[in-house]
Image: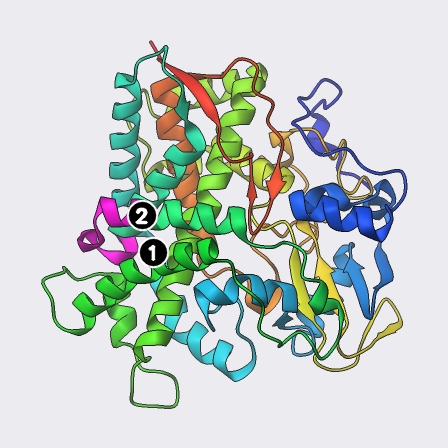
Amino acid sequence: MPDDLCGASTADAYVPPFPPRHPRTPRLDRLIRIARRNYLAVWPASVFRDDVVFRRILFRDLVICNSPETVAEAFVEQHEIFQRKSPQHRNALAPLLGDGLFVSDGTLWRERRRVVAPVTHPSRLPDLAPQITEAAAECAAAWRRHPPDAPIDVLAEMGRLTAEIICRTIFGRSLGAGAAAQVVSAFAEYQRLVDQVDLLAMFPGLDRVPRPVGWRTRAAARRIHAVVDRLIADILEGGTGEASLIRSMAEAKVPGTNRPMDRRAFRNEAIVLFMAGHETTANVLAWALFILSQDARSASRLAEELQRVLGGRPATLDDLPRLAFARAIIEETMRLYPPVPLLSREAIAEGRIAGRVVRKGSIVLVAPWILHRRPQLWDRPDAFVPDRFLPGAPRPSRHAYVPFSVGPRLCTGLHLGLAEAVICLATLFQAVEMRLEPGLEVMPVARLTLRPGDALPMRLRPRG
């Protein structure tokens, strides 16, 4: 049954935008056209009510796990069977990431994860958090100086801020703001160009056939590779770059060997770290700031908490236990707008979900976009109700809320990302009031990640 939210009223809660839901599944040709624009818009209303969905699309079986029980069955209990990313996912990211953690599986994935995971381990937080505070405070100061009559693209700003943070915390300042900005813009371009519909993947046996990659997509990937290759050369050839966590990763030994990762593997994992460390947090922050610009009641409650706890100074790691509402805003934002709204796998052997056989080669999905909006799991599922995540509120089932994935492939940087998002939100929100550019309609668009369109122009006014 839905949470009672500890008595919190949701009757007049703000409902942020989402694509309209089809009364029934569109025909395949129309479904493909919709998916190419925005795959969040393909789902019929019935999918949000079902525990599990079994479909066949062309020549592949599709299973959507949409209850805590079926999510656990597929991604936890049968992880070994359903660990491989789907062909569409692999082919979309291969030109950029090669065999990086996002798309690898089996022994290679286990080896790489053991090398990469220590970089963002929670034990690192006390050392990394001061640099998050520093970067957020610099951004807040720049926003206070920004002309109030000149719109600013908050989505791009959040991309730059989180890229700066990952440079300072993970890569070291030697990467440079200009190089980081180049990676951010190139990845945004890559997302715009990548094909969301891979029809060949629906034909078993053709998923490994090389896909044509457009020259602009290749160019965007090459821009990112060039920046990261320069960084790796500096690290591996003893350049002048300062010590950094990425340098520690470069020196770590591959499990079972006495050698580090080769350069190509190191580049792939460095790009994974950069993408995971900036893109997802940037999107969450952009969504949270947009929602607060529309939801006056939540904005007022947050302002009161920040005044009481911070009194105008930047937020730090030590403040997080007292910033309960700020954290709840971030968690509720990730419920409504999960950074990766679709988790897709391919069965490498026969399995079983909800008592039915799942054949080898089937595509198995856990879609946080759907799971997080199920009326059986959430009261007023499309409404923005941060109280769901306040201390004392009933916690959602462990497998009903999965913004950082679930099971053994759980994001290694979730603690760092959550702390970063709360510190940045608190610091920036104190600095300025935000108003959406008049006439702008915001709609979530999912390509590789879930963004509020391609830009989020807002007007800023210093507080106080």
Residue 317 x %, y %: 34, 42
Q: Which residue is mark 1?
A: 223
Q: Residue at x 83, y 48 (%)?
A: 47
The reply to whether discs 1 and 2 touch (Cβ–Cβ < 8 Å) is yes
Q: Which mark is residue 182?
A: 2
Amino acid at pointer 2:
Gln
Q: Earlier in the sequence, mark 1 or mark 2?
A: 2
User: Residue at image x 53%, y 13%?
Assistant: 438
Front residue of 319 and 266: 266
The N terminus: image quadrant = top right
On the rendered image, what quadrant is the C terminus found in? Answer: top left
Left or right: 37 in relation to 315: right
The answer for how far apart the CA atoms under marks 1 and 2 are is 7 Å
Q: Is residue 434 above or below residue 212?
A: above
| Residue 436 higher or lower than 1, as above or below | above
Q: Position of residue 12 (x, y in %)?
A: 72, 17
Q: Residue furthest front?
A: 215
Residue 176 belongs to the span the image colors magenta: yes
| Residue numbers of the magenta segment | 169-181
Does the magenta stretch mainly form a helix, a strand or a loop?
Answer: helix
- Mark 2 secondary-structure assignment: helix
- Quadrant position of residue 122: bottom left
Q: In the picture provided, is 59 more to the left or to the right than 451? A: right
Which quarter of the picture shows residue 322? top left
> Magenta span has 123?
no
Query: Hey, what amino acid is under mark 1?
Result: Arg
